[in-house]
Image (cartoon, rainbow, N blue to C red):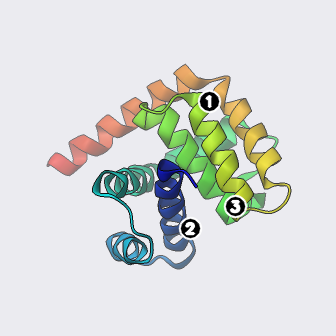
Amino acid sequence: MKPRTRARALALQALYEIDMSNHPPADVYKTRLEEMTLTDDLAEFSRQIIFGVLPLTNDLDQLIARYAPEWPLDQIAAIDRNILRVALWEFAAYRETPIKVAINEAVELAKQFGSDSAPRFINGVLGALADHEHELQEILKNKTAEIAAKTEL
């Protein structure tokens, strides 16, 4: 597995655990880092994903539901939902990952962690979202600014 893919895998596992168990994010991240050795820069990338996705989880889910309505969120497997959140966050909020890379990485994670049909499903949903890339970026830019303003108070 490529180094950045390993970092994404760590973030995905942490987000999945947090989603399913409601464990404290910092504790989950620390435990995952102890289980998977990453260089400092890759550990930081994982941290950015986890703590970038978490405050936007509801917004990411709403965008997935709005722009990919043929896939109801309550019917999406938890691991797939978290893969979608990571990819959407990467290309629409973080904006340092090209959309094709985010989609390819999400499909790779789906192959590793999802069901047999997960890679096609992830690719389809992200393809639908990719058609609205600039709109999604604008929405998440505003949400990220709101969250930053609240945390500065």
Callout 1–callout 3 Cβ contact below 8 Å:
no
Q: Secondary structure at mark 3?
A: helix
Residue lying at 41% horizontally and 31% vertically, measured from the top left: 96
Residue 131 in view (yes/no)? yes
From the viewer's perspective, tell me whether residue 68 is left or right of residue 101. Answer: right
Q: CA distance from mark 2 to mark 1?
A: 23 Å
Callout 2–callout 1 Cβ contact below 8 Å:
no
Alpha-carbon neighbours of circle 2 within 10 Å: few (<14), some, or many (≥20)?
some
Alpha-carbon neighbours of circle 1 within 10 Å: few (<14), some, or many (≥20)?
some
Q: Secondary structure at mark 2?
A: helix
Q: Secondary structure at mark 1?
A: helix
Q: CA distance from mark 3 to mark 2?
A: 14 Å
Q: Which mark is nearer the camera, 2 or 1?
A: 1
Tag on residue 112? 3
Q: Amino acid at mark 1?
A: Lys
Which of these two is toward me, 142 or 121?
Answer: 121
Residue lying at 74% horizontally and 56% vertically, measured from the top left: 111
Q: Amino acid at mark 2?
A: Tyr
Residue indicated by mark 2: 16
Alpha-carbon neighbours of circle 3 within 10 Å: few (<14), some, or many (≥20)?
few
Above or below, 96 relative to 89:
above
Callout 3–callout 2 Cβ contact below 8 Å:
no
Residue indicated by mark 1: 100
Q: Which mark is nearer the camera, 3 or 2?
A: 3
Q: Amino acid at mark 3?
A: Gln
Q: Reading the chain from its start, which is encountered first: label 1 or label 3?
A: 1
From the viewer's perspective, tell me whether residue 33 is left or right of residue 117. Answer: left
The image shows residue 121 at horizontal and vertical percentages of: 80, 47
The image shows residue 24 at horizontal and vertical percentages of: 37, 75
Residue extending furthest toward the left = 153
Residue lying at 49% horizontally and 71% vertically, measured from the top left: 18
Q: Quadrant of the N terminus?
A: bottom right
